Amino acid sequence: MKKTILLLIVLLFGTACSGDHRFKIFNNPAAQKIYKSSHCNAQRPFPQMILIPFFNKATQIVSRCNTYEKHKTSLAMIVFYQQWYEHFGDKNKTVRYMLEDVMIEWGDKKKIVKIAYDVEGNLIKEATVIGLARSGNYIWAWKGYNNKISETSLIHELVHQALRATNGTGDSDHEGRRYKGWTWEHTSMIIKTKNMLRTFNI
Ligand SMILES: [Zn+2]
């Protein structure tokens, strides 16, 4: 698995060799030491907060070490950014900076919230949710049953935060008309990104 992940990172960074520097920010050698020292320790009390490699100040909060290993979260974010850039570009590097500062908390159980919207924009009261994207660049995502990031809502929540960073609103009703930002292309990008993560078995 680690070989596969390394290969993907090489492939993604490889695209930067043609003069396109969009991924340069993910490979800051000065930060490598910090990333090495920030790791999950099963002997210590939980939850633990861990820096996500290649993303400056991005962190994740975990309640056990295999949910999720930091290199998997990092790879999911790299793939997210590659797909976002391909679909929507990233003027002023706004989404890159959002990713560098995001906090992701992995939850053990689904949550119930007073109101939520489905992807079509229909309002649901007392909704059971598997993810939340809050202001302050905070994401909560249920860890799921299969220990696979592709089967969680992380990519969906990152789209909310990317929209919040670029438009000022996370667009909680998705493709609905109440808030602007989310289009069918965002929904389609999420499906493509999750399929890429499945290819790499994460
Ligand atoms: Zn949503």
Image: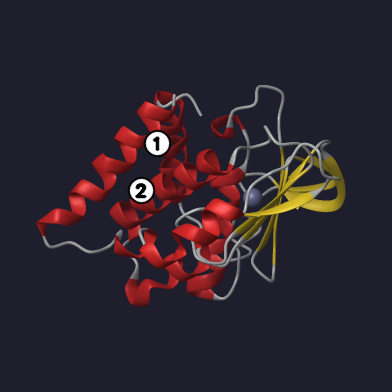
Relative to the observer, which residue lies in front, 71 or 23?
Answer: 71
- Can you give x and y, in whole percent of width and height, for residue 197 in the image? 45, 32
Rendered position, 187 above or below 24: above
Labels 2 and 1 touching (C-beta < 8 A): yes
Picture residue at 40% right of the left edge, 24% below the top: 199
Q: Secondary structure at mark 2?
A: helix
73 to the left or right of 93 = right
Name the N-terminal-most of marks 2 and 1.
2
Q: Amino acid at mark 1?
A: Lys
Mark 1 — residue?
192
List the single residue furthest toward the left: 18
Mark 2 — residue?
83
User: Does any portion of residue 52 appear in the rendered image?
Assistant: no
Rendered position, 25 above or below 41: below
State the count of labels: 2
Picture residue at 63% right of the left edge, 47% below the top: 39
- Can you give x and y, in whole percent of width and height, for residue 96 in the image? 42, 66
Relative to the observer, which residue lies in front, 105 or 151?
Answer: 105
User: In the image, is the residue at mark 2 within 8 Å of ligand 1 by its beta carbon?
Assistant: no
Q: Residues within 10 Å of mark 2 (few under 14, many from 20)?
A: some
Q: Residues within 10 Å of mark 1 (few under 14, many from 20)?
A: some
Q: Amino acid at mark 2?
A: Gln
Residue 138's image quarter?
A: bottom right
Q: Secondary structure at mark 1?
A: helix
Relative to the observer, which residue lies in front, 94 or 128?
Answer: 94
User: Does any portion of residue 168 appear in the rendered image?
Assistant: yes
Residue 29's image quarter?
A: bottom left
Q: How is the image coloured?
A: secondary structure
Relative to the observer, which residue lies in front, 154 or 65?
Answer: 65
